[in-house]
Amino acid sequence: MKRSIKQKLTVWITLLMLLSVALALGILASVSNSVIMEHTETQLEHTLRKKLPEISKENGKLAFAKGFSFLENGVYTIVYDKKGALLAGQIPLSFPDGVAFENGITRTVKGYHVMDFRLPFGWEDGVWVRGVTPVVDTDDMMDAFRRVALVLLPLVGLVSGAGAYLLARATVRPIERIISAAEAIGEGRDLSRRIGLPAGQDEISRMSAAFDRMFARLETSFETEKQFTSDASHELRTPVAVILAQCEESRTHAMTEEEYQKAFAVVERQAKRMSRMIGQLLQMTRLEQGTQQAVFEQADLTALVEVLCAEQPASKKDIHIQTDLQAEVEAWFDVTLMSRLLQNLLNNAVRYGRPEGHIWVTLRKNGDEITLAVRDDGIGIPKDQLDQIWRRFYQVDHARGPKSGTGLGLPMVQQIAAIHGGQMTVDSIEGAGSCFTLRFPAARQI
């Protein structure tokens, strides 16, 4: 049976806690046993050394200090002559006979700690003073540890299990929110949904933030695709309808070659309009989705503007383009996109300019900011429509002239400006002309 991460975490944390407590109890028991043995041996040596100055020999006989005790602190003090014969003290009943003497060394002999000291009274005279103390029986202590373990381990298992479950649930809850959001988006029910965990530096918070960014990109991509589909289907409907109507009209009523040529011209014009529209929509969509990346380079913007103004095709309106360009304005920009931006502005100025009018193109660098402006003396834009001109397919009312554009030029201009970290503004007076201004940083934007 497959277990959830929450269950696995609970089991593993509980087992780890039980193992840690059991290991701690085992170490404590082992250390306690060692401490007890060390304490017993230390007590033996301390007691025996204390007794040595209290033993002497007077008039050829052993003498002991007043209050001398042969059993103190559980240590038996026994005195032997140099041949090993008992002189004073009491030997524990179970202590074996004939244990050899070893001066100043503590050892264990059949359940007893033993230590001997040679106490000389002269060149040829002296005695052996032996200390004997029973080895502490640690069986009772180990039984106590086992009883504690039998009570403590289940309690630790219960408490650690409950704590591990609460910890696992708190840890997994954000992951469940991530799964829920991903499932909702995967089913296409709610692309605007976000996990929304508080910002933090832990792994789950960072993962949540990464998923939110991914969801935002998915939503943007979907909305862009939906916008492209909606725009294309809406705007292509008109030229398609015109082409179909013209074909039907030609097939039914056209009689002469001239009538057929006119029909073909209408079809060609509408097809070209469709082609331009689709090309612009695709480029805008690719830029929005990031599938087409801007290629920035350090270049001479003055030279680019001069070339584009010089190559602007002559208009039937005989509009004159005048330039006022600061020499050698170096900037960091995408040459292709910047060319498209300026070309769109020039085309708009020509399209809505007066016959025999003028277009003024200026370029200035002020500190770290570059200003590029295209001004005309055309028919201008009504004040109440200035905020609408940046919308896709929006075109000012027909009083301005024939609707020959696609309504995508200015939205693309604004998009290119944003890619360069800049901003487009427009000043216009109806009947007097318009001025479109781009301001963007000259240096590379990191």
Image (cartoon, rainbow, N blue to C red):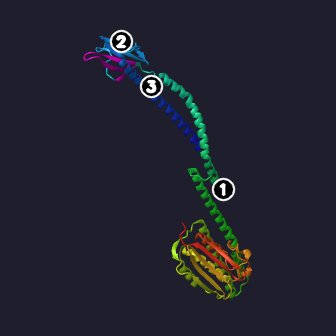
Quadrant (top left, top right, bottom left, bottom right) of the C terminus: bottom right
Q: Which mark is residue 88?
A: 2
Where is the N terminus found, in terms of image quarters? Answer: top right
Find residue 407 and report its image quarter. bottom right
Q: Secondary structure beneath disc 3?
A: helix
Q: Residue 186: image x %, image y %?
A: 63, 55
Which circle, 1 or 2, is nearer the viewer?
Answer: 2
Residue at 25%, 16% (x, y): give it.
Answer: 124
Image spot of residue 246 (x, y percent)? 71, 80
Q: Is residue 22 above or below residue 92?
A: below
Left or right, 373 with reference to 84: right
Look at 62% across and 58% down and name the residue there.
215
Of all residues shown, which one is farthest toward the left? 123
Give the residue at mark 1: 193
Mark 3 vs mark 2: give the one in front: 2
Alpha carbons under labels 1 and 2: distance apart:
95 Å
Query: Label 2 sits on what residue type?
Result: Ala
Tell me, yes or no, if residue 4 can be seen here. Answer: no
Q: Is residue 316 magenta?
A: no
Tell me if I can see residue 147 in this picture: yes
Measured in 3D between alpha carbons, the distance from the residue under mark 3 to the one under mark 2, in whole angstroms, is 29 Å
Q: Earlier in the sequence, mark 1 or mark 2?
A: 2
Q: Which residues are magenta?
A: 105-132
Q: Secondary structure at mark 2?
A: strand
Find disc 3 in the rendering and name its residue.
36
Residue 50 got which mark?
none
Contact flag, marks 3 and 2 (Cβ < 8 Å): no
Q: Nearer the viewer, residue 210 or 424?
A: 424
Disc on the earlier residue, 1 or 3: 3
Label 1 to label 3: alpha-carbon separation: 66 Å
* Of residues 403 and 432, the one drawn nearer to the viewer in this rendering: 432
